[in-house]
Image: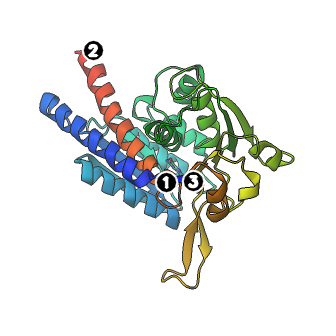
Amino acid sequence: MPAQIINGKKISEEIKQEVKKQAEALYKETGIVPGLAFILVGDNPASKVYVTMKGKACEELGFYSITLKLPAETTEEELLQKIQNLNSDPKIHGILVQLPLPSHINEQKILQAIDPIKDVDGFHPVNVGKLVIGLETYLPCTPAGIQELLKRSGINPSGKHVVVLGRSNIVGKPIANILLQKKEWANATVTICHTGTKDISYFTKQADILIVAMGKPEFVKGDMIKPGAVVIDVGVNRVDDPSSEKGYKLVGDVHFESAYEVASAITPVPGGVGPMTIAMLMKNTLQAAINQIAVKQLSN
Ligand code: GUN
C-alpha cells in the first residue's frame, strides 16, 4: 500500500491560526504585539526567499517585524552592534540571524550575542544546553516542526527506533535530542548517521522513523527503507529542470517516488517540513513575547 502523505502545509496553517488567536488574546490583555527582527547578511538566494516567507508569516499573524538587510562585506563588529541594539529594543521579542553567514563572520560569536530570551531559533548555547538536559526552552524551529508533524499525524516516536541522517546544529543534533527525551511524543531510541558513518543503508533499514537532513538530493532510495517506516524529508535542493519555467525544481534528500512505495507515511518536498519551520518560529516568537512580559512584571 502506498504511503500516507503528511501534509505539512495544512498542519502549519492550523498552527499559525492557533498562534494568531493566542497573539490576539495577548494583545487584548497586555497591549503587546509580538515583534521579530530578521537579519540577512549578503545575497544567498535561498536565504532571501526564507526571510521573505518568514516576514510574510509575521504579517499574516499580525506580528511586528523588521528585516535588516546587510551587505556581504558587513564586519563581525557591525553585526554584533546591530544585535546589541535589537537586544535592548522593547518592541523586538525575537531575533533571527539567517544562516549561513559569510565565511569571514564567526557564526558562534554572533549566535552567542543574542539575548537567550530573544533567541527564537534556539541556537544560543544556553538554550541548546537546556534542550539537552530536558528543560523548557525555545526548540529550534525545524526539529520542533518535525516533532509537531509526527504528533498531529498520530505517529508516536515512543519506543521506536528513530534514525537521523545528518548531524547539523540546525536539524540533526537538535531533533535527536528532542526525540530521545523522556517526554511525551519523544522517548525514542535514536541513532545519528553522518559523513563518517560506514554503510548508511545498514542503519536506514532499521529505522521505524527515518529523518533525513543531509543536503544531498534524492540520496535515500526506496530500497534503503524498511517497509512501513515513516520518512521525514528535511532536504530542500534545487536541481536543474529545463521543463520548468524557472529552470530548476525542488527535491528533497529522499527519492520520493521509490520511497512512497515502501513507507507507511512520508513528507513531500515542498509542502512537508518546510512550512512547519515557519509555523514553529511564530510559536516561539509568541512565547518569547510572553516570557519578556513576565520578566518585566517581575522587575516592576
Ligand atoms: N538556515 C537554515 N535553517 C535556518 C533556521 O532554522 N534558522 C536560521 N536562522 N537560519 C537557518
Residue holding disc 1: 272
Q: Nearer the viewer, residue 156 or 269?
A: 156
According to the picture, the residue beneath numbered tag 3 turns out to be 3
- Residue 288, numbered circle: none
Q: The disc labelled 2 sits on which kind of residue? A: Leu
Residue 229 locus on image (x, y percent): 65, 45
Classify 10 Å Cα crowding around label 3: few (below 14), some (14-19), many (20 and above): some
How far apart are the two marked residues, 2 and 1, measured between alpha carbons? 40 Å
Q: Is residue 172 left or right of residue 185?
A: right
Q: Is residue 189 above or below residue 24?
A: above
Q: Nearer the viewer, mark 2 or mark 1?
A: 1
- What residue is shown at x 46% (from left), y 58% (from top)? 271
Quarter of the image that includes the N terminus:
bottom right
Residue at 43% from the left image edge and 39% from the top image edge: 152
Q: Position of residue 58 (x, y in %)?
A: 30, 50
Q: Position of residue 264 (x, y in %)?
A: 59, 48
